[in-house]
Image: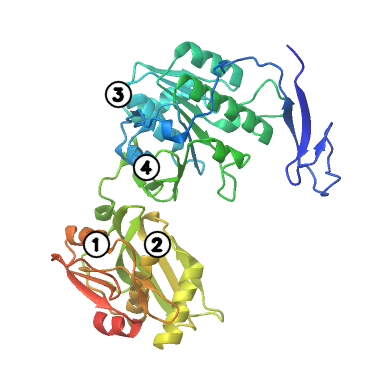
């Protein structure tokens, strides 16, 4: 085999060096030089054919629906846009212990397809122990391969010809063509490139698990997210039961869908109607609680907002948020004080979205305001009321998108009144819920209390 030509590139400025140095002489950064392949004469595993392409006019291109592989998880199918497209490469990232491997192992065990599960992190006995705990159903066509060499993995995959290939995780793989350690930028780029070529050539979908950094980004080069077809983010709070599956990128469908799971002893359980689970059934009405009608992608659901307002014991008032943007809360408190005259500058304000759910929907503003005012005045809000509206800097209540879906969801769950902006164009049809339209915070406060 011909010698592989490599060079060292600075990951900050891109300067090329023939050998490794501790410091880049161009930008002055330390430990940023990474080995990369410059010219590859031959490979251990040749998967590209010698097919010739020609230039064609766009009007001559025939379009058709993609062939999709349906999974056993309806939530995953929804997020992907109807299933896994053949030949696609899916990258799923998330915090350690959030349930990435559990979700994919459940798919491998319950799908009636030939599946190759490649693990570079666990032994076959560890995977089997987890499989026995997750489900009694055992897929006879589920094959395990514990290996980190990309050349051996692709050779075995070529011989097996699976319907789906799962790789856990991309950061553990390494190519023999590079001398750098597994998990480095060059190794991740080379291994992912080989897997993508394999998926496209053999028309076999591949799911990659990706580690994330402390900043929440998928570890490795950013180009990895550009190379794959779908990027999924699996997030949630490890101290809570619920997990959210979001699509950050999807070449074959919408990125507006969301999947919700609950972590139980037997693995991950799909949540069909999250609103009924996320709303606490209370035996008595308490102050500081309000229900928001939010929209995660195209999926409406109701969240419970809890607020606690108390006199500041120390000199500087505290502001604490769980599941909500703290800067957004500070803005809403400033609007309440400036536009509506509520003196909250000397009080501690604590805000929590129950269930460990994190969302940035501006329609939560009205429910946050309601919960804060309820706690401040110690007046309970009826558990049959819900809220959907965005607050502007001048104290006006602004319209929100897809109001009809939100009203229908609140009506379906038995709520009697929903507060919305009077600027929303509400359909003429009759709803079984009373719609209270408000324009300013002062008017909202008067109608609520």
Look at the numbered disc 4 and give the secondary structure of its residue.
Answer: helix
Question: Which is nearer the eye, 296 or 316?
Answer: 296
Look at the numbered disc 2 and give the secondary structure of its residue.
Answer: loop
Q: Mark 3 points at which residue?
A: 137
Contact between marks 3 and 2 (CB within 8 A): the answer is no
* Few, some or many residues within 10 Å of mark 1 (<14, 14–19, 20+): few
Q: Which of the colour schemes (rainbow, by chain, secondary structure, one colour) is used?
A: rainbow
Question: Which is nearer the eye, 63 or 192?
Answer: 63
Look at the numbered disc 3 and give the secondary structure of its residue.
Answer: loop
Cα separation, mark 4 vs mark 2, equals 19 Å
Q: Name the residue under label 1.
A: 404
Q: Name the residue under label 2.
A: 361
Q: Which of marks 1 and 2 is in front?
A: 1
Cα separation, mark 3 vs mark 2, equals 39 Å
Contact between marks 4 and 2 (CB within 8 A): the answer is no
Cα separation, mark 4 vs mark 1, equals 22 Å
Look at the numbered disc 1 and give the secondary structure of its residue.
Answer: helix
- Image quarter where the N terminus lies is top right
Q: Position of residue 78 (x, y in %)?
A: 33, 41
Sequence-earlier tag: 4 or 1: 4
Cα separation, mark 3 vs mark 4, equals 24 Å
Contact between marks 3 and 1 (CB within 8 A): the answer is no
Q: In this view, does 266 lie to the left or right of 22?
A: left
* Few, some or many residues within 10 Å of mark 2 (<14, 14–19, 20+): some
Cα separation, mark 1 vs mark 2, equals 16 Å
* Few, some or many residues within 10 Å of mark 3 (<14, 14–19, 20+): few
Q: Name the residue under label 4.
A: 79
Q: Residue at position x 64%, y 28% from top?
A: 190
Q: Position of residue 146 (x, y in %)?
A: 53, 20
Examine the image and state in which quarter residue 265 appears: top left
Q: Which of marks 4 and 1 is in front?
A: 1
Relative to 372, say whether 170 is above or below.
Answer: above
């Amino acid at each position: 085999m011909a010698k592989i030509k490599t060079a060292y590139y600075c990951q900050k400025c891109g300067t090329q060096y023939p050998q490794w140095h501790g410091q880049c002489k161009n930008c002055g950064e330390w430990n940023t030089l990474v080995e990369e392949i410059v010219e590859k004469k031959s490979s251990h595993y040749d998967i590209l054919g010698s097919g010739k392409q020609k230039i064609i006019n766009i009007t001559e291109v025939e379009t058709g629906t993609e062939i999709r592989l349906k999974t056993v998880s309806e939530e995953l199918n929804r997020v992907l846009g109807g299933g896994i497209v053949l030949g696609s490469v899916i990258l799923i990232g998330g915090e350690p212990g959030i349930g990435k491997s559990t979700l994919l192992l459940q798919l491998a065990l319950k799908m009636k397809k030939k599946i190759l599960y490649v693990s570079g992190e666990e032994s076959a006995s560890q995977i089997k122990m987890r499989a026995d705990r997750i489900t009694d159903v055992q897929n006879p066509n589920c094959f395990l391969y514990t290996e980190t060499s990309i050349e051996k993995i692709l050779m075995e995959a070529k011989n097996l010809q699976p319907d789906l290939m799962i790789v856990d995780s991309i950061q553990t793989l390494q190519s023999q063509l590079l001398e750098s350690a597994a998990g480095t930028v060059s190794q991740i780029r080379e291994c992912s490139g080989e897997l993508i070529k394999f998926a496209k050539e053999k028309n076999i979908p591949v799911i990659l698990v990706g580690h994330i950094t402390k900043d929440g980004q998928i570890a490795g080069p950013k180009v990895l997210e550009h190379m794959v077809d779908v990027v999924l983010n699996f997030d949630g709070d490890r101290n809570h039961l619920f997990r959210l599956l979001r699509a950050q990128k999807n070449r074959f469908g919408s990125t507006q869908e969301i999947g919700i799971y609950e972590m139980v002893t037997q693995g991950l359980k799909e949540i069909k109607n999250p609103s009924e689970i996320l709303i606490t059934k209370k035996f008595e009405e308490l102050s500081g609680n309000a229900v928001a009608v939010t929209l995660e992608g195209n999926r409406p659901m109701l969240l419970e907002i809890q607020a606690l307002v108390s006199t500041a014991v120390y000199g500087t008032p505290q502001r604490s948020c769980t599941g909500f943007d703290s800067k957004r809360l500070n803005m809403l408190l400033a609007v309440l004080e400036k536009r509506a005259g509520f003196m909250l500058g000397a009080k501690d304000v604590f805000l929590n979205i129950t269930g460990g759910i994190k969302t940035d929907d501006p329609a939560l503003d009205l429910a946050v305001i309601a919960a804060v005012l309820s706690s401040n005045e110690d007046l309970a809000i009826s558990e049959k009321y819900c809220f959907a509206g965005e607050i502007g800097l001048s104290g006006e209540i602004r319209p929100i998108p897809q109001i009809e879906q939100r009203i229908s969801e609140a009506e379906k769950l038995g709520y009697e009144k929903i507060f919305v902006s009077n600027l929303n164009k509400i359909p003429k049809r009759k709803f079984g819920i009373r719609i209270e339209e408000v324009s300013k915070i002062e008017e909202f406060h008067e109608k609520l209390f």
